[in-house]
Image (tube, rainbow, N blue to C red):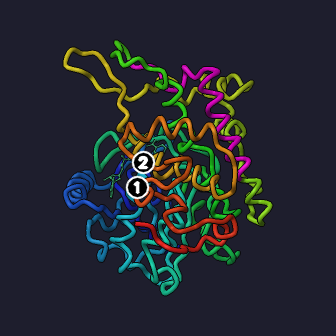
């Protein structure tokens, strides 16, 4: 069908995309922000002749056409630019590719949390309208995956059967249908649906809630003494942690109601328990409460909290991981900022955010408002001068706070 996709990022997920998308007939390019990473990937991939993805009962093999850190070599001929990187990489990547985008290109992030549309509008500037760009974001990565041999081999551990995407502009039904169909054809066994306001992706109760919430549950009353063993991250989920997760999900639900009453289509938004059962239902043995849903999810079995090993072999919690460095500025702080604009009380989000932000030496929530110095490097609507639900729904940048 002659579709060209450029995947930005060369981590675990990019390996899957390279192998799977090419095996399904697309031309796949890989764009790297870092030269050494591009060279390493290209050398390994050329040697292996392509990327092989192994899954329980299937394999996918594909050869990327261009592997480069130079956007001029891969972006100008690209129909769909797909960012599969941590959210803090979105802005720098968009800055790099912006001069090279083809007219009518779709540019999206999967997962695309943290007001990807606002971050992208700000990064692309006039290019967004001049080049008729369609922005899109997916609620979650469809895969659990890891690479085994860099640039050559990867394993696909799990696949989600459906992923929702949202788009900007959102009013072109034909374009939306084309994009959802194109993504569905690129992916084996995952259906993409395009529906609802862009805020639906931003408000999706996933990593932004789960990673800071579970971290808080485990460590909020830590006595500072090192441990002999890393605690299980999800399987230990108890009533307290379940209450934190449910509390934040309820606060988003209240925010969703305000935005709906102002006219946003958020009819497909799901609370955390409904969402988890929807995507993982089969492998969750106890559906009775949020804490049991997390504690008995087989897909999470054995995953441990990130730790740092001391010289004496004992363990301290490691708070400088993406669970906070990504999921606060492009997650929880954004959710808190949106709730604030909607006039929704957020005692649970506040507790978690005020506990977590000093651990990564950041300030988002200060004196009850999203106005800390680090809002300028986040997806918080406050960064973009947005102060009313109507402005949130319109989604334009009002003024920039730096
Ligand atoms: P990874 O850590 O393997 O790869 C990340 C890629 O992003 C690397 O190529 C790195 O160079 C690039 N990158 C990092 N910082 C950058 C920056 N500032 N500028 C430009 N590029 C930068 O990540 P992975 O596993 O491929 O995951 C990608 C995304 O998918 C993440 O958001 C992750 O949370 C999400 N995800 C991954 C899952 C998995 O099973 N691997 C499961 C669910 C979500």
Classed neighbour count for the residue bearing mark 2: other residues with Cα under 10 Å, few (<14), some (14–19), many (≥20): some
309 or 37: nearer the eye? 309
Q: Residue at x 63, y 27 (%)?
A: 242
| 390 falls in the magenta region | no
Q: Residue at x 40, y 58 (%)?
A: 377
Mark 1 vs mark 2, CA separation in Å = 6 Å
Q: Which mark is residue 9?
A: none
Q: Residue 78: name its quadrant.
A: bottom left
The answer to whether mark 2 is within 8 Å of ligand 1 is no
Query: Start and end of the magenta stretch?
Result: 230-255
Q: Position of residue 318 (x, y in %)?
A: 35, 30
Q: Which mark is residue 363?
A: 2
Asked whether, in this view, residue 161 is left or right of residue 402, the answer is right
343 or 20: nearer the eye? 343
Residue 232 against residue 353 in the figure, above or below: above
Q: Position of residue 76 (x, y in %)?
A: 38, 79
Residue 189 against residue 220 in the figure, above or below: below
Q: Residue at x 35, y 15 (%)?
A: 225
235 or 213: nearer the eye? 213
Q: Secondary structure at mark 1?
A: helix
**Dot placed on the residue nearer the N-terminal end, 1 or 2:** 2
Q: Position of residue 290 (x, y in %)?
A: 68, 29
- Considering every residue shown, the one lying at the far front of the view is 367
Q: Secondary structure at mark 2?
A: loop
Residues at marks 1 and 2 touching, judged by CB atoms closer than 8 Å: yes
Q: Residue at x 38, y 76 (%)?
A: 98
Q: Is residue 377 visible in this depiction of the protein? A: yes
Q: Is residue 177 visible in this depiction of the protein? A: no
Residue 309 against residue 367 in the figure, above or below: above
Q: Where, quadrant-wise, is the C terminus in this rendering?
A: bottom left
Q: Which residue is mark 1?
A: 373
Classed neighbour count for the residue bearing mark 1: other residues with Cα under 10 Å, few (<14), some (14–19), many (≥20): some
């Amino acid at each position: 069908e002659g579709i060209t996709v450029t995947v930005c990022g060369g981590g675990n997920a990019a390996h899957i995309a390279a192998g799977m998308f090419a095996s399904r007939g697309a031309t796949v390019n890989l764009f790297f922000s870092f030269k050494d990473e591009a060279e390493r990937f290209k050398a390994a991939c050329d040697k292996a002749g392509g990327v092989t993805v192994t899954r329980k009962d299937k394999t996918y093999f594909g050869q990327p056409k261009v592997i480069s850190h130079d956007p001029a070599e891969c972006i100008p001929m690209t129909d769909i630019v797909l960012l599969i990187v941590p959210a803090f990489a979105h802005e720098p990547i968009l800055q790099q590719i912006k001069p090279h985008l083809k007219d009518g290109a779709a540019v999206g992030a999967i997962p695309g949390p943290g007001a990807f549309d606002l971050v992208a509008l700000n990064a692309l500037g006039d290019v967004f309208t001049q080049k008729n760009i369609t922005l899109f974001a997916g609620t979650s990565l469809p895969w659990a995956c890891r690479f085994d041999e860099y640039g050559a081999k990867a394993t696909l551990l799990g696949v989600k059967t459906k992923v929702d995407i949202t788009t900007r502009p959102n009013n072109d039904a034909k374009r939306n249908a084309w994009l959802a169909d194109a993504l569905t054809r690129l992916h084996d066994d995952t259906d993409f649906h395009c529906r609802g306001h862009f805020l639906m992706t931003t408000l999706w109760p996933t990593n932004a809630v789960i990673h800071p919430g579970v971290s808080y549950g485990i460590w909020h009353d830590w006595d500072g003494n090192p441990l002999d063993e890393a605690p299980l991250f999800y399987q230990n989920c108890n009533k307290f942690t379940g209450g934190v997760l449910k509390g934040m999900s309820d606060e988003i639900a209240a925010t969703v109601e305000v935005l709906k009453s102002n006219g946003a289509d958020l009819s497909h938004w799901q609370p955390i328990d409904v969402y988890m059962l929807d995507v993982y239902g089969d492998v969750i043995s106890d559906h009775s409460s949020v804490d049991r849903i997390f504690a008995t999810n087989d897909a999470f079995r054995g995953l441990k909290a990130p730790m740092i090993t001391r010289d004496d072999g004992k363990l301290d919690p490691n708070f400088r991981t993406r669970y906070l460095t990504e999921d606060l500025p492009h997650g929880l702080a954004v959710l808190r900022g949106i709730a604030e604009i909607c006039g929704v009380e957020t005692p649970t989000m506040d507790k978690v955010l005020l506990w977590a932000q000093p651990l990564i030496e950041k300030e988002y929530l200060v004196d009850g408002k999203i106005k800390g110095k680090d809002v300028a490097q986040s997806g918080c609507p406050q960064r973009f001068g947005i102060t009313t639900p109507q402005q949130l729904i319109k989604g334009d940048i009002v003024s920039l706070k730096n």
